[in-house]
Image: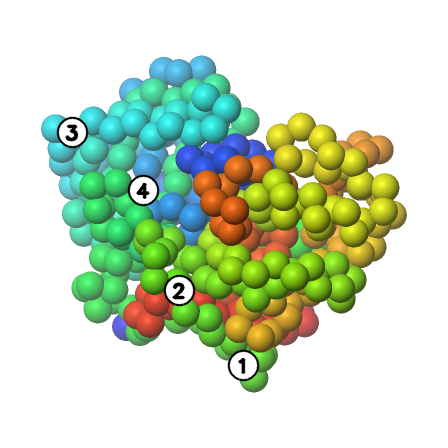
Amino acid sequence: MHALHIFTLAIAVFLFVDALPYERPKTKIDWTFLILEKLQELNVLFDTGSANLFVIGDECDSPACSHKLKYNSYLDESYKAIDLSFIVEYVSSAFAKGSRATTDIKIGSLSVETQDFRLVDTISDNFADLTFVGIMGMALSSASENRQLTPITNLINSQALGQPQFSFMLGRDADKTPSELTIGGSNPARYDANSLTWTNLVDNNHGLWKIPLDDCFVSDQPLGFQDRIGSIDTGSASIIMPSADAKTLYGKIPKSVALDKGFYSIPCETNIVISLRFSGMTWNMDHRDFVLKEGENCFGSIQGIDTGSDTAWIIGIPFLKNVYSIFDQGEFRVGFATLNQP
């Protein structure tokens, strides 16, 4: 039993690929299916905000499937079809549909036999510009449709991991720092162990990594948010909060202007520090993770839209780049720690 460290490329932003109304990035990570005597490598998104596993199959003839590397089930000796269809609907009319199946997979040196997954044969145009060809959900299995066991759950159940945990370090383009996923524990070289702070999942978590948020700060000024619940989501390119909360936050940022889809324009020279507090520990965001530049214009990486509740937040990459995050499936908790300097 061991921990597997997987390095990734830097994460980009502003791509829709989730069932919830927020945006997801593209992440290049090699995830492999076992196919006969050779491996077919497929790039997928490792996503703590969902629990389903799907890949685009070679029978997908949708325009968005063109020019993508596809999974070829005909070459897969361990592939077994399940006579059930599926459809996943996304925001902006995005969708993916196809059939269910099982196969043996490898993630680095870790193997999972008879893994349940979804094989996509039709997909909407919203996926056309995405470089990855699938999503590997890393939420709890109870969040999956039809209670599909996630690869992480299967690895835990087979006692293949040293600890029932996985951890992320998300790099930043500007600093040329790498990203790293560790499965089976954490990488102590990446963080200050003395700073590690755990927060238990809320009871009504629906299988997601939902933890209570103490408050949010703008330049050390508390906003007085109470009873907020944050879903920790490595797949979200934004921090998502209800529109009223976003209005309060951006009200503290000079010259911010509300735009469509819950975004706000902000001055490009903005260097305000946004902070989030969990379990009494306050974590600051680098202002570069808050200010998103597009040409000569700048926007905040915090988005205000309907999250399904006045207290529901999605805590995505802009925050997670600033901490080392550990997801503990054994104790149902999330840990944050200070990143060690490279």
Identify the element where label 2 is drawn.
Answer: loop
Quadrant location of residue 160?
bottom left
Residue 107 seen in render: no
Left or right of 172 on screen, residue 191: left
Which sits in the foreground, 342 or 201?
201
Mark 3 residue crowding within 10 angstroms, few (<14) / some (14–19) / many (20+): few
Residue pictured at 76% horizontal, 64% vertical: 221
Q: Identity of the amino acid at label 4?
A: Leu
How far is mark 4 from mark 2, CA to CA? 23 Å
Q: Identity of the amino acid at label 2?
A: Leu
Q: Identity of the amino acid at label 3?
A: Leu
Where does label 4 land, which residue? Answer: 53
Where does label 2 land, which residue? Answer: 201
Identify the element where label 4 is drawn.
Answer: strand
Residue 329, x across and y down, in percent: 33, 65
Contact, CB < 8 Å: mark 4 with mark 1? no
Where does label 3 land, which residue? Answer: 84
Where does label 1 land, which residue? Answer: 193
**Mark 3 or mark 1, earlier in chain:** 3
Which sits in the foreground, 79 or 268?
268
Residue pictured at 42% horizontal, 52% vertical: 48
The quadrant the C terminus occupies is bottom right
Mark 4 residue crowding within 10 angstroms, few (<14) / some (14–19) / many (20+): many
